[in-house]
Image (spheres, rainbow, N blue to C red):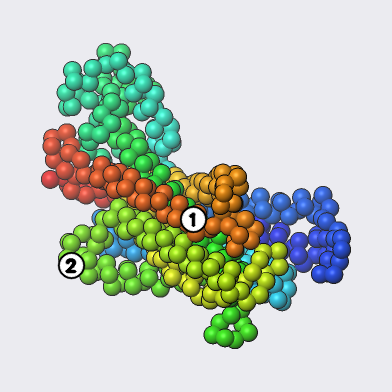
Amino acid sequence: MASFLGLLVIQLTAWIKKMHPPHCGRDSITCIGPTTGQMGFLLAGFGLLIVGAAGIRPCNLAFGVDQFNPNTESGKKGINSFFNWYFFTFTFAQMVSLSLIVYIQSNVSWAIGLGIPAALMLVSCTLYYMGSNYYVKVKATGPAPLTSIAQAIVVAVKKRRLNLSEYPLDSLFTYISPQSINSKLPHTSQFRLLDKAAIITPQDGINPDGSASDPWSLCSMQQVEELKCLLRVIPIWVAGIIFYVAIVQQNTMLVFQALQSDRRVLNTNFKIPAASYTIFQMLSLTIWLPIYDRILVPSLQRVTKKEGGITVLQRMGFGMFLSILCTMVSGVVEERRRTLALTNPIGVEPRKGAISSMSGLWLVPQLTLAGLSDAFTIVGQVEFFYKQFPENMKSLAGSLFFCGLAGSSYLSSLLISIINRVTAKSLTGNWLPQDLNQGRLDYFYYMITAIEVVNFGYFILCAKWYRYKGTGPSRSGDLELDQVSKPYERTVNSV
């Protein structure tokens, strides 16, 4: 509802004349800016969109996963396919938005162009509430997830001076609340210092139902293992932030490259808008995901006998390798574009510089690699977070993913600022000037390639060290056969 109201407010700024400044023609020397009220109304719309995005984005994937039963073969296959098809439809919607709706906004009417998303969001809200009775809704039980994590950290710090070797594994506190929706996690040997939070001392009280009388003084091994799950994910998350820097560049620098390239199609007068080249990246992702889900995964399953054909970390790693190829190709193409712009220009782009005779279609290969890299790493990363976080933290997993994307954008901006500051005083001059022909964007791409190579090596080390949730030996040395799915009130016997 917040997203709908935000889109409606923004649409009204274009529809109602008093809600926006007067029209400013191309020949006008000065233009009248918005009033304080007009700007405040627009910012209110953005604020509502932020509230809506914060509610939808972390939760919609988690809510979608809740609709599948992980204890059945069809449910497991459904979960694996769900992430692929979610990003397929999400990217397809972006393509429609960046092409058809942007065209309407620019060439027909801003009021109509902004009204279409608002109308679609109203339809979305209606369908969502109409299907409310059919959804599987997992009710929140027990302490808040972050509270449980905080308790495990605090208690581990309090008992840091205890000698863990003096306390056998069987003597540690192993209580699990019957209302918990989380699957039982076996003990793992990583981060063993945190196991001290489950040491029962004479000062610790136990309630008649077996729970700790003071959860800030004694935690169960289940809480400790849930904390370990989060800690194990963090290094992989950091690698994902650095990986996405390469993809961010395809959405920023590539627009400037396209502006100074020959954007005509097949010797016609039709020019592809510079900002529309990113559609090729989305197109490669939308074409590849169905092929991967329906053809490649079943073929790999027959060979590897694994549920998804390959592990999630293997999928992410292959995407990171493609990102290295993407930035390397970007550097080679930019070097060629710049050379032709200096030696054989076909025109001049206002406020930019000479237009290269290189066809803008030579930018498509790097965009294709970027889309394929997204299909492997981004989709794999989302699946990884949702499968490796405790069940009651799936919305937190979504938040972590989007925070990672934001971190990549900030890191990219930081790199550009550093390069501008360092190279401005160098002999070669600024690598990233307004006129790319006077800079060395290709050097910048090669630098990103080197960073991605180092990050790829770091990711491989993290992947080898990583232990998947539920694969560690339990107290008796056994392995959990499957995860317990409390939302469906089913139990699974262990070996």
Placement of 260 over or under 176, stated as above or below: below
Q: Amino acid at mark 1?
A: Tyr
For the residue pair 481 and 462, the one nearer the viewer reads as 462
Quarter of the picture containing the C terminus is top left
Q: Is residue 334 left or right of residue 47?
A: left
Residue 439, image x, y percentages = 58, 57
| Residue that numbered label 1 is attached to | 443
Q: Are marks 1 and 2 in contact (CB under 8 Å)?
A: no
Left or right, 380 with respect to 34, comes to: left
Q: Tell me if residue 484 comes above or below residue 316 in the rendering.
A: above
Residue pictured at 34% horizontal, 50% vertical: 456
The quadrant of the image that shows the N terminus is: bottom right
Residue 374 visible in this rendered orientation of the protein: no
Amino acid carrying label 2: it is Arg
Determine which of the numbered discs, if any, sits on residue 495 in the image.
none
**Does residue 173 show up?**
yes
- 300 relative position to 5: left or right: left
Q: Position of residue 358 (x, y in %)?
A: 53, 74
Crowding at dot 1, Cα within 10 Å, few <14 / some 14-19 / many 20+, comes out as some
**Percent position of residue 308, x then y:** 26, 61
Name the residue carrying label 2. Answer: 302
Horizontally, residue 28 falls left or right of residue 378, namely right
Q: Residue at x 36, y 47 (%)?
A: 454
Q: Residues within 10 Å of mark 2 (few under 14, many from 20)?
A: few
Circle 1 or circle 2, nearest the eye: 1
Where disc 2 sits, the SS reads helix
